[in-house]
Amino acid sequence: MTNKSRKLEYTYKFLSQIIKDNKNSNIEKYINYVKSLLYYVGKVSLSTLYLKYKGINLKQFKDIVFNNSLENLPEIFFDLESVFTSNKNISDEDKALIVTNIQKLNLEELEQICLGEMYQSFITSKERKYLGQVYTPKQIVIQMINEGINVEKIINNPYFKVIDPACGGGYFLIEAYKRIKEILLDNYDKILFKKPEMKEKLDRNIDSFIIENNLWGCDIDQFAVFMTTISILLKGKPNKNTKVNIYKLDFLLEGKSNIFDLIDYDRKQKNKDLSNIKFDLVIGNPPYIGHKKIDKNYRKELQNYYQDVYSDKSDISYCFFKKGYELLQDEGVLLYITSRYFLEAPSAKGLRKFIVSNFIIEFIVDFFGKKLFKGIGISPVIIKCIKEEFQKEKTNIYRFKDIKINAKKDIKIFVEELFNHYLIQSTGLSSEGWMLMNREEKELYEKIHNMGQINLNEICYCNQGIITGCDKAFIIDEETIKKENLDRTIIKSWIKNSGVKKYKMGKVEQYIIYTDLINDLKTYPNVLNHIAPFEDKLKKRRECQKGLRKWYQLQWGRRLEIFQGPKILFPFKAEANRFTIAYEEILCSADVYIMNLKNNLYGVSLEYLLAFLNSSLCEFYFKSVAKKVGEKMYEYYPNKVMSLNMRVGKEIKTIEQKVINITKLQQKNTECIEKTKVDDNVNNDIFGTIKDEIKFIDNYFYSLYELSEKQIRLIESTILNM
Ligand SMILES: C[S@@+](CC[C@H](N)C(=O)[O-])C[C@H]1O[C@@H](n2cnc3c(N)ncnc32)[C@H](O)[C@@H]1O
């Protein structure tokens, strides 16, 4: 990678200073300003390049940069001129400075200008979140491009076609351009030996050749298309007739069966050459947009067209796999960096099946919870698939080690220091979820799973906690109860996710007004007074609008019984297994799940079940199939928890007693901590005993499952790093 020269570095800094000086607190206005500025920078950079190559004269140059002349500029400037009204936004003084600065750059420096990179550095994570645009770190882009485009492929086919279906700032295409140019130049003789007819094409203008024959991209966002187009046009010797294949379109829906129908439409001209194009490489970072953020009608259309991969709760990124597949040549490569959620998400079942049935999966690089994108909480995978009908026996997995690295930009995929490399059986990639474990882990997982005698679904129910629809109206504290003299018969203890710990519950500090018990609101005047200020908001809840709830009722109050008897509680998201038991009535929020025993098959008690769920063995077992959503964060999706199998030993009573003991000690420990007067030794004693009891249970399950020392070590070391 070439580093930026001092002059170019200075230009970037200088532009960012102009932006800082014009910072607007209104996000939309600010983003618009940044775009206008970049629109102008694009104009100046391109016309400077034209001037240097004597494609235009000084007068024409001045007309472009100071008098808004669009003559001599590519079509895309016409489309955007009115949108970015650059002239009004940017002062004449700033314009003059921009022109002076850019004119100082030499050809090599001009070529390095990447508007997308500037854009990313000028907008902060706040704006990025607002726009939902995340761009891939440059180092990763380069490595992916090197994986997708190799010397042999280009020598055999100089017309190798690459498409980035959601090109954003154009990083992938810019790197593809560099890579292809380097290969073409380095292997010039070899190519001409094989294909003498290439001589004239490559000699005439190699840059135009690459831009027209190798690179395709599209994006739904007009400005992304602009940035990519200009950054590409800045490469090499300009040719005003060069046709850039970057289009503004919805890759998934517009043009449906053939995106090029739409391209024809978009360009308002027929270009017959495009009608039958298939690509050799589909590469990029497709957008991830969950079902909640997608317009209902758009979702319906996706469901209709992408039935096999896109269902109820799917992410839009899943459709990019199918569309990518459709556009690929046989043996073509699809190489995406995308959120790792699809490996385990239940809503990606169709996608997993689609990939396995239609591609060879060459490798998966799993960042395993490590977040890679600035300001966005997503951990990615890079997946390389080849369009082939048969599946290879093994798939390469590169799993990120739990290592602290300072600069994410330095991540080198595949290297041993950062990634564990191993092969897995491709047949093990079932549509139920992809377990990317190594052989020992997989064997151990299977042993635990197969030795389980009872499936948790057989012995208990699992329910989600309560959704009030407006916590401010229903959740209160003791002081409010007293002050407003609220009727205690409908007030219940309330606990949230953070209050649910391993064998332990936090102190109850909040309460819920369980209004579902009310028949006639008038008989609860104080409660009415309390919730009345929220009436308008409460009436707007979907269930109220549909007439399913009275305005004062809870949105999803559940059945009270599930909170009443003894039950196990667990948080939806947690770093480790955090199950606890509650004997008394306690109600909880929707980020907590509740397990109630429905029978006592095999004599299993709630305490025994709890011991199993909190054991290290179970933690390894569950995390092997769970959805990892952060560096050390898992989703305790109830269906996944309930699909675990449990082995039942003879010592149920002993284990029960241990659990009761731990629970009591944990309670005592909390009390000790609360009454700060208790000396530390007592605390340490209690803590030590709890640890011993937990160890006892761990060992009990190890021996019940007949694990070897090696397997125990594997569990203990793995869960530490999981
Ligand atoms: C995650 S960004 C990736 C950009 C770029 N590939 C990169 O990694 O730097 C996703 C891009 O997808 C674009 N996009 C969203 N929906 C799209 C669609 N249906 N068709 C084409 N592009 C879309 C967004 O405008 C955004 O620029």
Image: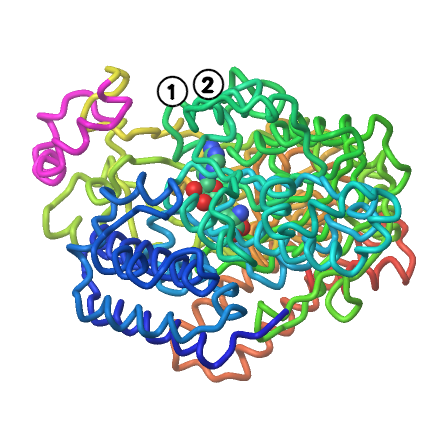
Q: Residue at x 23, y 52 (%)?
A: 68
Viewer-closest of 513 and 28: 28
Residue 115's mark?
none
Residue 328, visible in the rendered structure: yes
Up-down relation of residue 276 to residue 207 (above or below): above
- Predominant SS along the magenta part: helix
Q: CA distance from mark 2 to mark 1?
A: 6 Å
Viewer-closest of 120 and 74: 74
Q: Mark 2 and mark 1 in contact? Answer it, CB < 8 Å.
A: yes
- The local secondary structure at tag 2 comes to helix
Viewer-closest of 130 and 345: 130
Q: Is residue 537 magenta?
A: yes
Residue 636 place in picture, x, y as percent: 57, 44
Residue 573, visible in the rendered structure: no
Q: Write the start and end of the magenta stretch as one range.
A: 517-545
- When asked about the image quadrant of residue 708, the answer is bottom right
Quadrant occupied by the C terminus: bottom right
Tell me the kind of residue under disc 1.
Answer: Asn
- When asked about the image quadrant of residue 485, the answer is top left
Which residue corresponds to mark 2? Answer: 301
Which residue corresponds to mark 1? Answer: 297
Quadrant occupied by the N terminus: bottom right
Q: Residue at x 54, y 41 (%)?
A: 286
